[in-house]
């Protein structure tokens, strides 16, 4: 009877084996993708390699979609439902305006603008893009420039080349990627920066009668073996931001917030909005992501490879309540693996 059945169904064994392979392949794709997505749902970053994969969360749609597609010929309804649900969840996290707005934690500013600032942040990759940044600043004419990975020689080069337009600067001078500087058209008053392995200078600037607090951000990257430093330094920025705003010590002791100093926190955060540590910085610090407010929440800032490699937005300009943002643009700089971010901010009463 078995021989007769094989004659009646030629290739039946091969088809069955093919469906088994498809089933296991589909399950492996969906299980791996679900494991990473579960940390996003749980509002946690997890151990290596989860934080590294969470940075590229929109690209997880690829294995989730493949898992869904291979579930169909495998004739496994449960796997198909699993793949469809996972794909829908990832698509929601990637594109839903509600998810983006919920992560900001700051309502849109209202009222007539009383000051306007054009802010540029740029990672120069060990100073290699210094010349490109000079050209970019001369062309775009920002009011404030937050520069990361700029050693003392790079700081001197920028200060000399931009002396006519941006004569004021405050730097943390250090070798390699640890050096950083804030350049300004307007006078700067140095302020205590947030401690980190890489330089994070702070300052105050006057903008049309408003005193604005500036802080450069450049926490350690979440590479294997460096996750503890990454979490600690992002948490340091969160605690600093919380201390500046309505949730800070003055507000808690007085029972009501006095008029807060507006805050601009900008730089290479080595974190995207899909990292729980970054979302806590936004929420607990009462900050908004200017690129998201301007409609560019998913624009890529790193890595710039010239090819189809996946990208992520880890360079940000964060602002306190009272700021509105528009014209967020990510601009390439020759010599850097980051795009610079230029955004126009309006401070409203």
Image (spheres, rainbow, N blue to C red):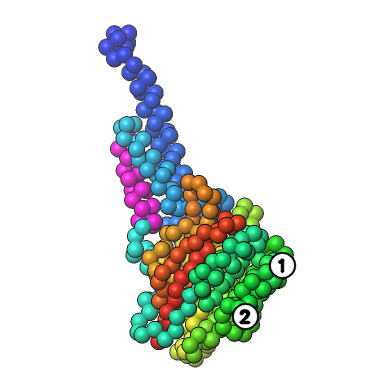
Tag 2, which secondary structure? strand
The quarter holding residue 2 reads top left
Q: Main secondary structure of the magenta part?
A: helix
Residue 242, horizontal then vertical, whole percent: 52, 77
The structure residue drawn at horizontal position 55% and vertical position 70%, both measured from the top left corner, is 137
Indicate whether 138 appears above or below 68: below
Indicate whether 100 appears above or below 30: below
Query: Does 161 sit left or right of 64 as displayed?
Result: right
Indicate whether 274 appears above or below 102: above
Q: For residue 1, say whether it is visible.
A: no
Q: On residue 153, which mark appears?
A: 1
Q: Which residues are magenta?
A: 76-94
The quarter holding residue 348 reads bottom left
Indicate whether 11 appears above or below 86: above
Residue 305, horizontal then vertical, whole percent: 54, 50
Residue 341, horizontal then vertical, whole percent: 50, 66
Instruction: Count the numbered circles shown.
Output: 2
On the image, numbered disc 2 is attached to which residue?
168
Tag 1, which secondary structure? helix
The structure residue drawn at horizontal position 60% and vertical position 56%, both measured from the top left corner, is 335
Q: For residue 87, say whether it is visible.
A: yes
**Residue 86 among those drawn in magenta:** yes
Q: Where is the C terminus found, in terms of image quarters?
A: bottom left
Residue 330, horizontal then vertical, whole percent: 47, 62
Q: Which one is in front, 142 or 83? A: 142
């Amino acid at each position: 009877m078995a021989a007769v059945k094989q004659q009646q169904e030629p290739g039946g064994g091969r088809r069955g084996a093919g469906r088994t392979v498809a089933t296991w392949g589909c399950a492996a794709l969906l299980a791996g993708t679900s494991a990473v997505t579960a940390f996003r749902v749980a509002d946690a970053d997890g151990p290596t390699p989860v934080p590294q994969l969470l940075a590229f969360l929109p690209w997880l749609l690829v294995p989730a979609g493949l898992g869904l597609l291979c579930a169909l010929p495998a004739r496994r309804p449960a796997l198909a439902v699993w793949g469809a649900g996972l794909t829908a969840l990832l698509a929601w996290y990637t594109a839903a305006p509600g998810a983006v707005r919920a992560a900001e934690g700051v309502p849109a500013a209202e009222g007539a603008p009383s000051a306007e600032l054009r802010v540029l942040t740029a990672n120069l990759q060990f100073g290699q893009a210094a010349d490109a940044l000079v050209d970019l600043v001369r062309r775009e004419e920002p009011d404030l420039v937050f520069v990361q990975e700029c050693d003392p020689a790079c700081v001197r080069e920028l200060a000399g080349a931009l002396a006519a337009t941006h004569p004021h600067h405050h730097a943390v001078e250090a070798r390699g990627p640890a050096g950083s500087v804030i350049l300004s058209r307007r006078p700067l008053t140095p302020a205590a920066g947030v401690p980190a392995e890489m330089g994070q200078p702070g300052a105050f600037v006057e903008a049309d009668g408003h005193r604005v607090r500036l802080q450069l951000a450049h926490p350690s990257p979440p590479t294997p073996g460096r996750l503890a430093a990454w979490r600690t330094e992002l948490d340091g920025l969160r605690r600093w931001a919380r201390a500046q705003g309505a949730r800070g010590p003055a507000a808690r002791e007085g029972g009501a917030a006095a008029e807060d100093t507006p805050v601009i926190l900008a730089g290479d955060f080595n974190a995207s909005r899909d990292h729980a540590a970054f979302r806590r910085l936004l929420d607990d610090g009462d900050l908004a992501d200017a690129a998201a407010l301007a409609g560019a929440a998913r624009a890529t800032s790193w890595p710039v490879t010239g090819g189809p490699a996946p990208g992520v937005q880890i360079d940000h300009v964060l602002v306190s309540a009272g700021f509105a943002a528009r014209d967020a643009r990510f601009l390439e700089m020759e010599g850097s693996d980051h795009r610079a971010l230029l955004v126009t901010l309006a401070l409203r009463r």
